[in-house]
Image (tube, rainbow, N blue to C red):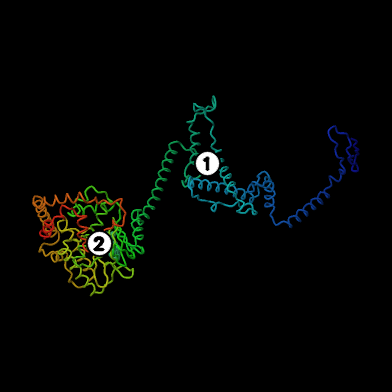
Amino acid sequence: MPIESGEGPSSTVVMTPLTAACPWKKTEPISASTSFRELMDSDLAAKLQKEEDEKFAHELSRSPKTPIESEISVSTEHDDDDVHQIDPSSLELDEDNDYLLALMLQQEYTKEFNGMMKKYESTVNRNSKVKVSMKNFMLLPASNPTQTSDTIDDEDILEESKEAFSDCEQDQRMPTFNRRGTSGKGASLVTKHNAELCGKRNVARVMNTFPPEFETGNVLNNIKLSNRVYNQLKLHSYAEEKRMNRLHDKVEKATASLAFDPKTRLILYKSLNSCILDELGSIIATGKESIVLYGKGGQTDLHKIPSEVAIKIFKTSLNEFHTRNQYLREDHRFKNRCKGLNPRKIVKLWAEKEMFNLQRLQRAGIPCPTPVLLKKHVLFLSFIGKDSVPAQRLRDAVLTPEELANAYKQCLNLLKQIYHECKLIHADFSEYNLLWLDNIVYVIDVAQSVEPHHPNAYTFLLRDCTNVSTYFSRRTLNDYVLSPEETFNHVTGLGFEKRGQEFLNEIQAYEKNVRLQSEAIKEKDNFSFEYFFNQTKELHADDSSSDEDDDNDDDDEDYTDLTSGDEYAATLSKSLPSKIMKSPLRKTKLSKHTP
Ligand code: ADP
Ligand code: MG
C-alpha cells in the first residue's frame, strides 16, 4: 500500500484506494480521503459540532417527547413482548439523571406491588369457583406514557410476580443438601441445621408462605430468623387465621339468627301453597324467644282463617332451652311429655302450651289473640291491629291520664280473671306483653303461663303484680296505684299482711302448701277405682291411636285446627297427659283444690 508522507505543515497523508487482493473477499475501495490538517482543525470541529446541535434541535422540535422518554421508547421498541422493561444498560449513560432513576425505581416498585397483588389473588381464590380479581388494584406502569391498561396482560403480571418472588428467593438461595443433610466438603461443609442457613430459610418462608395479610415488614435485608422465632410467628399466624375465620362465622350466624331454618321455611311455604296464607308480610317483632310475622289470611275449606294473621315462630335455638324447661317440667299438663325430649321437641311443646293457654284466656272472654292453627313450632294467631299496622305495646303507647287510669283498671281485672277464671298465672305480665288497641288492653305471650300448682306460681304472680305496680306508678301522678303486695292480695283474695322480704317468705310457704296439697290429692287419685278404670280405658285408646310424633309428617292434616267447635277437647285429648286429662274425676279435682 503506497503511502506518501511529507515533512512540515504542508505534508499530507494520502490514502490511495485499497486495491490489494484479499484471499477471502473483495474489499470496497475507500473513496474519501481527508488531510491530517483537516482532521486536527479545531474550527472545523466546532463547525461540525454546531451542525450536529442544529440537527438535534430540529429533531427535538419535531418530536413532543422528552429525551428520556424518547430514550425509553427507543429502548422498548425492540422488545414488543416486554414493553414495561427499561433496559438499564441502554440507559447507563444517563443513570445519574434523577428523573430516570426515579422512573426506574417506580417501575421496580410497580412490578413488586403487582406481584404481591397477584399472589394475594391466588391465595384468596384457591379452589373457589367464584374468582376475585385484583386487577383494578394493580398499578399501571408509570414510565411509559404510551402504555394503556389494555396492554397489561395477566400473564405479564404473573411473570412479574414470579420475578419479584424469585428475586427474594435468590437472595436466600440455599445450597443443595445430600441425603445425610450436608453440603460441601472440608472447611466449606455445612449441615442443613446450620444456624445461618436456617435463619435465611426462615426469612424466605415468612415471605413466601405466610398469608398475605400477615404483616411481616421487610425481612429480606440480611435478617435471619431463628427457628424459635419462626415457629412462634407461624403459630401466631395460624391463630390469627382461625380468629379471622371465627369472626367471619359469627357474622354469618348473626345474620342467620333472623333467618328461618329450612323446616320453618317449608311450613311457611306450604301454608302459602295450601291457601292458609294469601300473603306473607314483614316481621312485626323479634322477641327473645320468637319471631312474629304479619300475614294475610287465605281461604280454605279446611280452616277458617281471619283476614289478618300474626305468625309466631318460636326460635329453635338452644339458648331458651333451660328457661323453657323450667316452666314445662313443673306443669302437670306437660311434665310427662317433656321428659327426655330434645330442644327442638321442647319448642313444639312450648308452642302448644301457648296455644292451650290462649284458648283458656279466650274462653274466659279475656282480650287476647285467637289461636288459629298450630304447625310444629309455628303458631298462627289472629292479628291484633288494624290494616296491617300492629297494636302498640303498652310500653310504647303514649296514653293520656284518663287512658292510663283505664288501662290500669283493665290490667288489675286481667290479672284477677286470669287467676280465678283461667286458673293460670301469666308469669310474664308486663307492659311488653300487653297490647293497646282502641282503649283495650290485650294479653299476649302466654307460653310461660303456669297453673297455681307450679312450685313457683305465687312468686311469679308477685312478680307480675310488681310489674304492673311499677309501670303505672311511674306514669301516673295520682297515688291510687296499689303497691305490689296490695295488688297481690287484691288479685288472689289472700290477706298476707307482712311487707317486703317477709311477704315473699309468706308467699313461698303458701306455695309449698298448695303443692303438697295437690300432690296428696294426686296420690289419693292414683289408688281410686276411677284411676285404674281410666288407666285400662286409656290403654285401649292408645292401642288404636297412632303415635303423635309428627316429625316426618308434613301433610296439611297435620295442622292443629283451633277454630272448629270442640277444638279444645280434641287438642286436649291429643296432647295433655292422658293419665290426668282423660279422667273426668281428675278434671273436677283440679278445679276443687285450686285456692
Ligand atoms: P316473645 O315471646 O318473643 O316475647 P311475643 O308473643 O311477646 O313474643 O310477641 C313479640 C311481639 O310481637 C309483641 O311485642 C307484639 O308487638 C307482636 N305480636 C305478637 N303477637 C301479636 C299479634 N297477635 N298481633 C299483633 N302483634 C303481635
Ligand atoms: Mg313477649
Quadrant containing the N terminus is top right
Q: With 268 as the anchor, is 200 left or right in this view?
A: right
Query: Residue 458: which disc?
Result: none
* Image quadrant in which the C terminus is located: bottom left
Q: Is residue 5 left or right of residue 109?
A: right
Nearer to the camera, 493 or 224: 493
Is 114 placed left or right of 531 in the picture?
A: right
52 vs 529, nearest the viewer: 529
Q: Secondary structure at mark 2?
A: loop
Residue 56, image x, y percentages: 76, 53
Name the residue type under label 2: Leu
Please give the residue where the numbered disc 2 appears in the rendered image. 562
- Quickly name the residue at label 1: 220
Q: Residues within 10 Å of mark 1 (few under 14, many from 20)?
A: some
Q: Quadrant of residue 398?
A: bottom left
User: Where residue 396 appears, x then y in whole percent?
Assistant: 29, 68
As rendered, which of 577 and 207 lies closer to the eye?
577
The percent position of residue 158, horizontal first and vertical second, equals 57, 45
